[in-house]
Image (spheres, grey):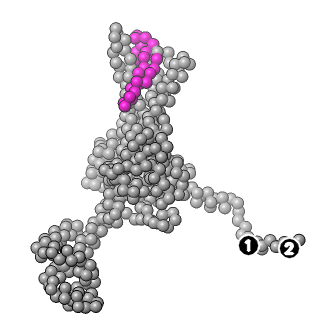
Amino acid sequence: MGKRTPPPEPAEVHEIMLRDALEERYLAYALSTITGRALPDARDGLKPVHRRILYGMRSLSLNPGSVPKKSAKIVGEVMGSYHPHGDQAIYDAMVRLAQDFASRYPLVDGQGNFGNIDGDNPAAMRYTEARLTDVARLLLDGIDEDAVEFKPTYDNSGKEPSVLPGGFPNLLANGSQGIAVGMATSIPPHNAAELCDAALHLIEKPDAKSKSLLKWVKGPDFPTGGIVVDSKESIAEAYVTGRGSFRVRSKWQQEEGARGTWVIVITEIPWLVQKSRLVEKIAELLNEKKLPLVGDVRDESAEDVRLVIEPKSRAVDPELLMESLFRLTELESRIPLNLNVLMKGRIPKVVGLAECLREWLDHLRDVLIRRSNYRKGEIEHRLEILGGYLIAYLNIDKVIKIIRTEDEPKPVLIKAFKLTEVQADAILNMRLRNLRKLEEMEIRSEDKDLRAELKGIKG
């Protein structure tokens, strides 16, 4: 029989209270859920998965005018490079960014079946294609110009932006939904033009309160339409405190038929309500005899929503009929507002409308300063090179002689014409064909234009 190896000596054991261990581990989990998954950043209005999808699509050059690529390729790129989670989770997030009935301003331009308002599922990612929209391009604009901080990706193989430049009020314009640990967020979409008008007012009067911004932002603006039926006071209170809800009703009209008959036609339904489920619910209530005023319901929708509701008789009051439907079905829906967002990308906080827009404006200011500094550095570098070209142009024969005769021409050039390292490298790396382009007037005019731009930036 072979000899049995003795078990290894146990490492030093630290006793710790179960409660303390659980608290520590659960807190770490809660924090990662809050900051890394469920709550959007107040600056660009995105959660990490959405930010990585947009950045991944940009790295695949899927700009608005380009040819779309397979969704499977996009999901693979995002999962492999930036977001080490399930491919289905990434695809679901991307689908939502492409649905014009879920997003007020879609960030992804999808081709193929991306689901519909009836609640049908999108096609598998191998069948659909996608590219960025113009709105997404606004969010990414300036990312190559040192506009934002970058951080290492999960495997340290590259870099990803910790926030996007965000030249679009995406948080409020597209809204956001999320459930974290011990907190949740629910932001309905708004009209971007109204948000920009309110932001312009905030720039002029930085101390403006949320209530004064309601002159521009009247309430949410849903991609599927509908009518908000709350009082102005309750809407104002929701925006001031950052918590509240909106009662949204379907838009309807009475259509006259032949011989005094009429039907009710519904053209807009509340946000995130599945149309097919809504029709099923009304049909169920009809079978259960809970809608005595309604005779029949049918869905005549094509591109636009068109639900037709027939009354039991023409003597029925249409207002009463609709009240009974609003009470019993999702034709009236309550949409919560909970402006719980990450301030500065780290601190979860429930904020009012003014504070939310101010955070976005502060971010835009930072982005503008960073981009201006980047451009300033580029101009200064180019001016230095142009100075070198001008010296080379004025002494072209001597420069060519030094390059032809010297073993190490760089130090000789620097010494002869008092050049910097950058200027000497630029002259030595210049192609022969560029010699004919070296015209003094051209160099001087580019120099003049750049100096004017630099003065503007410094100003």
Residue holding disc 2: 3
Count of labels in the image: 2
Left or right: residue 88 versus residue 8 is left
Task: Out of 241 and 292, give the one closest to the viewer.
Answer: 292
User: Amino acid under label 1?
Assistant: Ala
Which residues are the magenta region? 296-319
Q: Position of residue 179 (x, y in %)?
A: 52, 47
Placement of the C terminus among the 4 image quadrants: bottom left
Residue 15 quadrant: bottom right
Mark 1: give few (<14), some (14-19) or many (20+) Cα within 10 Å. few
Against 300, residue 61 (above or below) is below
- Residue at image position (25%, 54%) is 204
Residue 366 in sight here: no
Residue lying farthest top? 259
Left or right: residue 12 versus residue 71 is right
Residue holding disc 1: 11
User: Amino acid under label 2?
Assistant: Lys
Against 294, residue 18 (above or below) is below
- Residue at image position (44%, 65%) is 159
Helix, strand or loop status at disc 2: loop
Residue 268 quadrant: top left
Residue 352 magenta-highlighted = no
Residue 308 magenta-highlighted = yes
Against 347, residue 256 (above or below) is above
Q: Position of residue 134 (x, y in %)?
A: 32, 49
Q: CA distance from mark 1 to mark 2?
A: 24 Å
Placement of the N terminus among the 4 image quadrants: bottom right
Q: Which mark is residue 162?
A: none
Q: Position of residue 218 (x, y in %)?
A: 33, 40
Query: Which of labels 1 and 2 is toward the front?
Result: 2
